[in-house]
Image (tube, helix red, strand yellow):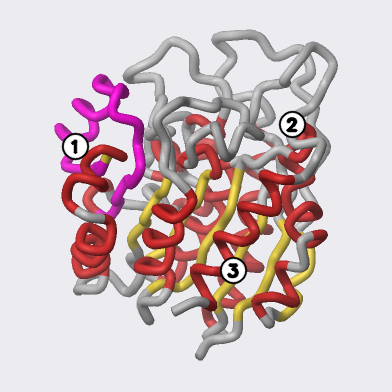
């Protein structure tokens, strides 16, 4: 059994402000899950904190590209260093975000090591880029596009390693059924997607097993799991920046995670977007912690 190592990546650099003058509260995610004793309950080891730069959009305006780009470009290699260290050591890094832009750190780390896949559990594709939108700006809605080399050079080609992920090595799981335009583009690029309805129709254990089989074969050397809390239905997870309806239910996410993280070819996972500021009673954070712990510990 590999050692689970908890690494905090409390970056909110990729999200738009929730209100003028405010900053996104997802940087508190790691602290909230630690308050639920996630480290002790997983029997995990401490991997420390990769401290992000300050959130400051300055005089950014629509049309200026990705805001906080310099800060994200500086932070991503530092996070990648920490993830790479643990993957090389044979550990299982569990990275607590943060917004979805932290996934770039994992993709860059694994690109340094070889060719790896990504199982992205997310309500949306996070595939906005200049080729399909005039509203590029928030990296947390664009990280899959950036990781596959679509977008501005300072984020897509760090260390000259563009792309960090190949299109065909991504599996997008839990996307909402009403994102038709996103699915059309992804299908054209041969990026497989599985909607909530499809997961239920075909069976989550069966579909997850099929996904894992495609990620366990050469030329892939392994894969990473990206979990965005907004994949859950907002009735149980309202504390996210975009609470879209008709999401996964808790037991469904547990089944999905179990099937993905227990493969020996799964090398790590990150958790993103849960915002404790939107969860004053802490119930959603407790639920998220329970689901993650169950995926690793329950039979």
Q: Is residue 206 left or right of residue 235?
A: left
Determine the secondary structure under disc 3: helix
Write the start and end of the magenta stretch as one range. 169-194
Residue plotted at (17% across, 51% down): 202
Q: Is residue 14 visible?
A: no
The answer to which quarter of the image holds residue 197 is top left
Q: Which residue is mark 2?
A: 278
209 relative position to 15: left or right: left
Instruction: Note whether 86 is above or below 1 in the view shown.
Output: above
Q: Position of residue 54 (x, y in %)?
A: 83, 37
Q: CA distance from mark 3 to mark 1?
A: 34 Å
> How busy is the neighbourhood of tag 2: few (under 14 within 10 Å), some, or many (20 plus)?
some
Is the C-beta separation of discs 2 and 3 under 8 Å?
no
Which residue is depicted at the point 45% across and 65% down? 110
Q: Position of residue 86 (x, y in %)?
A: 60, 77
- Read off the residue under disc 1: 189
Looking at the image, is 261 positioned above or below residue 111?
below
Secondary structure under the numbered disc 2 in the rendered image: helix
Residue 255 in view, yes or no: yes
Q: Tell me: 277 left or right of 161.
A: right
The answer to if 186 sits in the magenta stretch is yes
Taking the spot 62% from the left edge, 61% from the top edge, the residue there is 290
For residue 293, the mark is: 3
* Along the viewing direction, whichever of 172 and 147 lies nearer the viewer: 172
Which residue is at the front of the view, 125 or 137?
125
Q: Nearer the viewer, residue 69 or 154?
A: 69
**Camera-side residue of 43 and 105:** 43
- Cα distance in 3D space between marks 2 and 1: 36 Å
Q: Secondary structure at mark 1?
A: loop
């Amino acid at each position: 059994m590999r050692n689970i190592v908890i690494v905090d990546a409390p970056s909110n650099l990729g999200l738009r402000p929730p209100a003028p003058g405010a900053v996104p509260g997802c940087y508190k995610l790691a602290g909230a899950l630690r308050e639920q004793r996630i480290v002790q309950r997983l029997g995990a080891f401490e991997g420390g904190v990769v401290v992000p730069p300050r959130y400051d959009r300055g005089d950014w305006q629509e049309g200026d590209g990705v805001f906080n780009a310099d800060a994200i470009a500086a932070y991503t290699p530092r996070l990648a260093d920490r993830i790479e260290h643990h993957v090389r050591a044979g550990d299982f890094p569990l990275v607590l975000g943060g917004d979805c832009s932290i996934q770039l750190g994992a993709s860059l780390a694994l690109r340094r090591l070889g060719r790896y896949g990504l199982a992205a559990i997310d309500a949306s594709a996070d595939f906005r880029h200049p080729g399909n939108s005039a509203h590029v700006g928030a990296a947390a809605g664009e990280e899959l596009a950036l990781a596959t080399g679509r977008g501005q050079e300072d984020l897509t080609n760090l260390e000259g390693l563009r792309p960090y992920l190949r299109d065909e090595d991504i599996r997008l799981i839990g996307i909402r059924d009403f994102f038709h335009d996103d699915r059309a583009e992804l299908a054209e690029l041969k990026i497989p997607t599985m909607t909530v309805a499809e997961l239920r129709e075909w069976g989550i254990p069966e579909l997850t097993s099929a996904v894992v089989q495609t990620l366990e074969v050469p030329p892939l050397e392994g894969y990473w799991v990206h979990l965005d809390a907004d994949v859950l239905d907002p009735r149980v997870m309202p504390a996210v920046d975009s609470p879209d309806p008709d999401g996964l239910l808790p037991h469904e996410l547990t089944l999905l995670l179990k099937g993905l993280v227990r493969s020996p070819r799964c090398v790590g996972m990150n958790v993103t977007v849960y915002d404790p500021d939107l969860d004053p009673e802490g119930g959603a954070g407790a639920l998220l912690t329970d689901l993650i712990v169950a995926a690793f510990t329950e039979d």
